[in-house]
Image: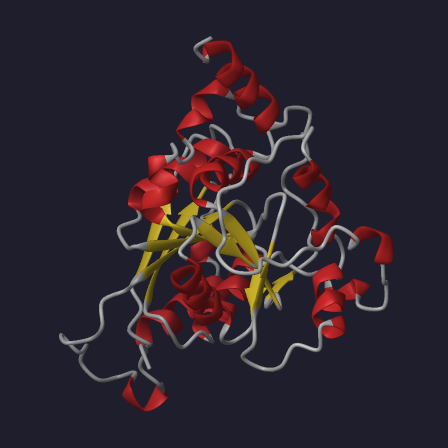
Amino acid sequence: MSHRTSESWAREPDASAEPPSVDVLIPTCDRPAELAVTLAGLAAQRDPSFRVVISDQSREQPAWQHPAPAAMIRVLQAQGREVVVLRHVPRLGLAEHRHFLLEQARTRHCLFLDDDIWLEPGALQRMDKALLELGCGFVGMAPQGLSYLTDRRPQEVVTFERWDGAVTPERVRPESPGFERWPLHNAANLSHLSADLELQPGEWVPYRVAWLGGCALYNRQALEDTGGFRFWDLLPPEHAGEDVVAQWRVMEKFGGAGILPSGAVHLESPTTVTDRRVEAYKVVLREDAGTAKP
């Protein structure tokens, strides 16, 4: 076990404690209630050892100063987890915020976790194990909206394809067949697929994705080697889809996979990304095409 349980919370920190092997990177803005739930999910994770970095862009009081997130930060710290809280303003866009967070990472693996995602116990360990065994650039759990558990959408899961054997590099673009996998992550589709596959506790299955938002665990070196989010300065502050660009680049060189079952639950709060007129991949791919050598 990589963390201290309640009988040890008040003891002096153990200098021989296992160093973190995963950085959990959480961008947040004006969502103290959701952030508290996200942190509570992390507090329920046992292994691997991890560090939490929270970067806040709230318009007024930082979210971590509200009682509920503050309490969950204290729980994590009592467990022996390092929690770093940062104020990152002015707001220059989602890609720039993720770029800033990636600059704070120092472990082999880094989990980009949105501030409205609850992880079931064991989810982090399952993703970390999958990333190590598959040896690819990233794995992830697409967040599930549990209000849709009775809403089956068979037409949206026809593109499901599990990875058999090694996860290999793959190029995905809007005109490629892989792009048509995007509906897989709607509603509670992955929960229905997991049930249909009759997955047992502890069992996991990698599958092919178009991209995967909200909860993605990267091999940090792979993400940095493909540019990370350094393309942020090509974009206006109001944009969406920055994770699509980063993941397509990682997938093309190192491969990437989704993991079933998904233990990530979307809180289904209203989105804070209300202006989606600029899709990051359209701008960045156009720039790439314009600078490519003939």
Residue at the image position 70 percent from the left and 56 percent from the top: 268
Q: Is residue 124 above or below residue 161?
A: below
| Front-lying residue, 66 or 132 | 132
Kindly tell me whether residue 236 is visible in this rendering: no
Residue 87 appears at what percent x and percent y?
Answer: 37, 43
The residue lying furthest to the left in this view is 15
Horizontal arrangement in the rendering, residue 273 relative to residue 115 (left or right)? right
Report the number of discs: 0
The residue lying furthest to the front in this view is 165
Residue at the image position 81 percent from the left and 51 percent from the top: 156
Residue 109 appears at what percent x and percent y?
Answer: 35, 55
The quarter of the image holding the N terminus is bottom left
Q: Is residue 216 above or below residue 173?
A: below
Kindly tell me whether residue 246 is visible in this rendering: yes
Residue 14 appears at what percent x and percent y?
Answer: 17, 78
Horizontal arrangement in the rendering, residue 139 relative to residue 275 (left or right)? left
The residue lying furthest to the bottom in this view is 7
- Residue 228's quadrant in the figure? top left
Q: Is residue 247 above or below residue 195?
A: above
